[in-house]
Image: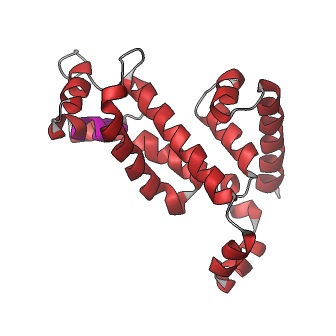
Amino acid sequence: MGEDGDGPVTEENLQTQRLPALDASVDDVRRAAQGDNRAFERLYRSHVARIHSLARRMVGPEDADDLTQEVFVRAWDKLDTFREESAFGTWLYRLGTNLMLTYRDARSRRPTWIAEEAEEPEEAARVATIDWSSVDLDRALAELPDGARKVFVLHDIEGYRHEEIGEMMVIAAGTSKSQLHRARMLLRERLTR
């Protein structure tokens, strides 16, 4: 932005734009890779809203802040691996998606007795009596099975194709399609009750 003719860089336009077109300049990426903290801060401000949105949908609002921070910590550590073969936003998004998928998988492998002990009785009662007619999309997404939620977010919200989702999640494209169908049916059922 700025030097490329897209208008001046201001706090307002950084916060209101969330599309891939907001991709940072190559100069900022190169400077950040050489240790320039200000350049990395510009990259952070340009992409934090999109990464946080992805985290909310992939892992839920309770873990979104921590995972967003972890994505940027990893990005800082791995900037030297960015080869400029794609846009920085695409590289960062892929890094974030992989981190979140790994986190979800690790969390789902946790023994169920640990999850049951950690659950507050009031929270369990509240979840059991949710009135789905007043629930928002994020809440409905959080209630989907892991595989269906991941595919729904990657396909319908983020715009990935089934083949790309298959590569990211190490599943067949057909499995991605069936998980998407399942997610849509469950969401429709929950949001229309």
Majority SS type along the magenta span:
helix
* Residue 121: quadrant of the picture: bottom right
**Is residue 31 left or right of 191 when viewed as pictured?**
left
Q: Residue drawn at (38%, 43%), measured in percent from left and top?
A: 74
Q: Residue drawn at (51%, 44%), measured in percent from left and top?
A: 99
Q: In this view, does 109 lie above or below 58?
A: below
Asked whether 45 falls inside the magenta stretch, the response is: yes
Where residue 139 sits: x, y (%)?
Answer: 65, 58
Q: Residue drawn at (74%, 70%), measured in percent from left and top?
A: 112
Q: In this view, does 139 lie above or below 50?
A: below
Where residue 19 sits: x, y (%)?
Answer: 43, 29
Quarter of the image with the C terminus is bottom right
Where residue 12 sits: x, y (%)?
Answer: 26, 40
Does residue 190 show up?
A: yes
Does residue 130 show up?
A: no
Range covered by the magenta-colored residues:
41-47
